[in-house]
Amino acid sequence: MTSEHSFIASLRALATSAAARDLQDDVAVLRVGGTDLVLTHDMIVEGVHFLATDPPEDVAWKLVAVNLSDLAGKGARPLGLLLGFTLAGDDAWDAAFVRGLKTASDHFAAPLLGGDTVSLPAGAPRALGLTAIGEAEFAPSRAGAQAGDLLWVSGTIGDGAAGLRAARGEIDAPALRARYRRPEPRLEAGRALAPLVHAMMDVSDGLLIDAARLAEASGLCAEIVLDEVPLSADYRAFMGHDLNARLAAATGGDDYELLFAAPQDAAEHIRVVEKRLGVSLRQIGKLSAGSSLRLTWHGEDVPAPDRLGYEHGLK
């Protein structure tokens, strides 16, 4: 099967507009007047991004949230949504999804603008798509990091992956299950941080793989101190906090936190944002000359795991 990375590489020859950002970002950015129009499209598939047993209201919330998380990573404010919906012949499921979509749309002030519906063959898994449109004064890319920048992350890491285990009934952890089913994109934090950073993106496929992507786009090496990767109390209680638990958290995905590179002299301003918004912002490493990813634990180098995070097309 073609991997996500290689397929995207094959599309770059088609993405000739500067708005495409060489397909190295999660969004397209069109400069209109003095404003960046930010566009993103994400899909979620039953059995891959959500479970068949997940409540349809939660599926709708997650579909909206994962798209708005891409806007958050660019410091954008949502303007509206376009829905791609597959009809599977279950009227009750569809009605519940619509209720969940309204809840999410109202919560994030992201109105539905339109979209499309298609019918699924009998027994086919649901595949749902959403395009989110936002605006920003300036949308930082992945590619702007500089050597010497500090690498930061918001919130806690690993709760989404642990929450999937809770949703499957493997552990009894309602708070973690909620993090998996109903993530909260960091829209306000993204807007506050955008003027302070050199590069920013959201963490969706796993902290390590997304840090590697930011570093690659910027032509740098990402050095991550695993001791500093922030874990929630619930994650620690159910999964532990040793090296293996931290690597599991950092490769698990579904966190929808912000990952950003900022100059060292921005640290004081970042702390002001942290205090004002009440969101944890943790320095977890730095960007340096070179390439790839460097991990340390208790001051010692640690080999990067074979799997840095989730990538479609890879087993």
Image: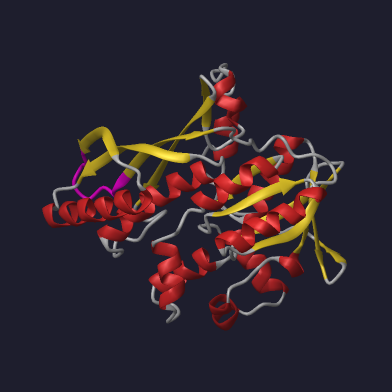
Q: Nearer the viewer, residue 101 or 193?
A: 193
Residue at figure coordinates x 59%, y 19% from the top left: 18
Colour pattern = secondary structure
**Residue 184, quarter of the rendered image:** bottom left
Q: Going by the image, does 35 lie left or right of 105? A: right
Q: Nearer the viewer, residue 225 or 270?
A: 270
Q: Nearer the viewer, residue 312 or 241?
A: 241
Residue 297 rendering spot, x and y as whole percentages: 80, 68
**Do we see residue 292 in this rendering?**
yes
Which residues lie in the magenta part? 119-127
Residue 111 rendering spot, x and y as whole percentages: 30, 41
In this rendering, is residue 287 above or below 276?
above
**Do we see residue 223 in this rendering?**
no
Residue at figure coordinates x 35%, y 47% from the top left: 109
Please say whether residue 311 is one of the residues in the magenta stretch.
no
In this rendering, is residue 141 above or below 233?
above
Residue 259 rendering spot, x and y as whole percentages: 64, 51
Residue at figure coordinates x 84%, y 72% from the top left: 298
> Magenta stretch mostly in which secondary structure?
loop
In this rendering, is residue 180 above or below 236?
above
Q: Going by the image, does 53 lie left or right of 205? A: left
Please say whether residue 121 is one of the residues in the magenta stretch.
yes
Residue at figure coordinates x 37%, y 57% from the top left: 50
